[in-house]
Amino acid sequence: MLEDLSTMESPSIIRGTRQAVMPSVISKEFRDGYSIYPSFSIAEGMISSGYSSLADWIISKKTVCVDGYVAVDWAGIKAALEKEFARRSVRVNWIETKDFFKPEAEIDIMVAPYLGDEDSVWGKVCDLNLAEFFDMEGLKNLEADQEFELNIVWGIGASFVSTFNSIAYFDIPKNELLFRVRGNSAFNIGSTTRFNMKKTYKRLYFVDWIVLNAHKKEILSKIDLLADSQWLDTINWIQGEDLRNSLSEMSRTVFRPRPWFDPGVWGGQWMKAHFQELAQDEVNYAWSFEIIAPENGLVLESSGHLLEVSFDTLMFQESKNILGSGHPQFGDYFPIRFDFLDTFDGGNLSVQCHPALDYIQENFGEQFTQDETYYIMDCKEDAKVYLGFQEDIEPNRFKKALEDSVVEEKELEVAEFVQEFTSEKHKLYLIPNQTVHSAGRNNLVLEISATPYIYTFKMYDWLQRDKEGKPRPINIEHGFRNLDFSRKGEQVEREHISKSYILEEREGAKIIQYPTHPEHYYAIQRLDVKDQIEVQTADKVHVLMLVEGSKIELEDRAGNQQTFHYAETFIVPAAAEQYKIKNLGEGEAKVILSYLK
């Protein structure tokens, strides 16, 4: 919930980033290359723009519940709508849900068990529901005041009021939400206290997002209007039925999530050089979140207007079509993650590991753990990958060396303990949970992984400092509760570096199999396409990226065609059944493909 700024002429929203907000209207300028604003086209006239049209819709309904997500600029949007209502001489009764939150101290006590230790990066996934944050008797029994022409219940949880005619929902993309958190412009549910960024994010991840996503899923079929509130000067919106029909259409054909990008202490320059739409004044880009379902959005386009919904909105409605045979295991949880790690002219990733399955379940409440692979998209000659232990590893000696490095701030001779491999383009390194690993500088890593993404136990960080000049948190104890010291010596070369082979050759194409570790629940192939290839989904979701070549065309079974460029990630749902990839560039197109085993 944002600070109440309704008395100001315009809201004071600060974004902690140099990156621009996504445009509300698509540019007609042709760009032949990687796009940071991919969109899925729907029928003309489905997306409306501006507060005037939104105000007209609200007035027509007489009584409206305006629900929404944390970090929406409730005060700024209300001020914009009040101007429109005033122009129409409509008297409005505003009922704000924040007045029905339980006392802040009570909420703090309620969420405390899920936030872990004060100095910990992690909490535990909560089992609360949104109703527990409210005085529900007072909220649910609200009645419209007949002396007003328009009654609006306004804010998070508004749809709990069942006596009003319609539900509008104001959403905000996760990347924009996090930029506002970094700008100190956002608050947690039911809170008016400014926490530091670490605590705010921890409460978002382990509490707010859990309860708000469950609430959104529950009311999705009842929403009459959904608005994208990421812009401060306008708003785009879509009728609920049109949204649901569009999601249904998307679930049967190829689509590309909207990526977002973040700098980091070890970040590099490769993405800045190759993705021209990125803000070039950012110091570096460490990550591109190509598809991390809890944080990515999907952009709809109609008559040039753009509207972004969260990826999980699609999963809440269409998970069976998306996942096919994977649905019984994963439900509405999208299980595969693609992201870039860019260390070109940057630094080294920390020496790290990820938790065992039982450890992440018991300590953090997650259902799945963070099993990873590193696919080398590009690298310089001196680039390294650190993976597995040396044959003569002595755990106690390694731990003491790590602890001494923290206390004395001295460099660790990593290769004395951890094996060092020369990076090779198109090679796949296998990193199941409990495996020690790191990527050195001058790599562009495509990380193909299970979806969990924050459970990294850093044990050595190469003495790197964050932007405040402080060391990042080190988690030696967590690491040593999880490290598998049997992954050492020749076994690492044998079991943790994938031995690719030609699975099938066809006219104009071949399929390369990259065997993954038994711990990985996903498989990886590469489609090398000179001309074209037809692919069956076999009732599995396919996540793909063009890793070499300039562009390809993907045609679904209905004949719909979309073009994808180098380094772009796209998804073919299980329900698409089959598709054809055609190489549109010179030379061979190489397309990486991951699917559930």
Image (cartoon, rainbow, N blue to C red):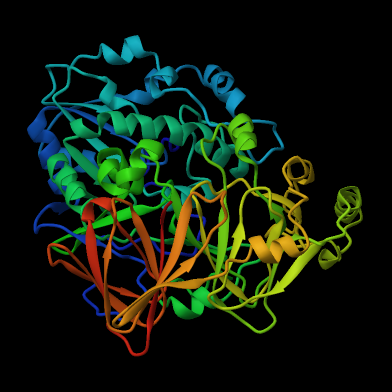
Query: Dividing the picture into quarters, in which one does residue 537 lie?
Result: bottom left
Residue 357: x, y in percent?
Answer: 60, 39
Where residue 291 sits: x, y (%)?
42, 56
Q: In the rendered view of the protein, which quadrant contains the N terminus?
A: top left
The x and y percentages for residue 517 are 57, 55
Judge left or right: residue 323 versus residue 362: left
Task: Name, please, the residue furthest toward the bottom.
Answer: 586
| Left or right, 189 with reference to 44 | right
Image position of 578 (left or right of 278): left
Foreground of the two, 272 or 566: 566
- Residue at 63% from the left image edge and 82% from the top image edge: 380
Where residue 220 appears, as percent x and y from the top left, is 24, 34
Whether residue 117 is visible here, answered yes or no, is yes
Question: Foreground: 397 or 470?
Answer: 397
Q: Against 566, is 395 above or below?
A: above
Between 20 and 148, the one nearer to me in the picture = 20
Q: Please determine whether, in this image, residue 292 is positioned above or below residue 552.
A: above
Identity of the residue drawn at 50% across and 17% down? 103
Looking at the image, which residue is at 90% across and 47% down?
396
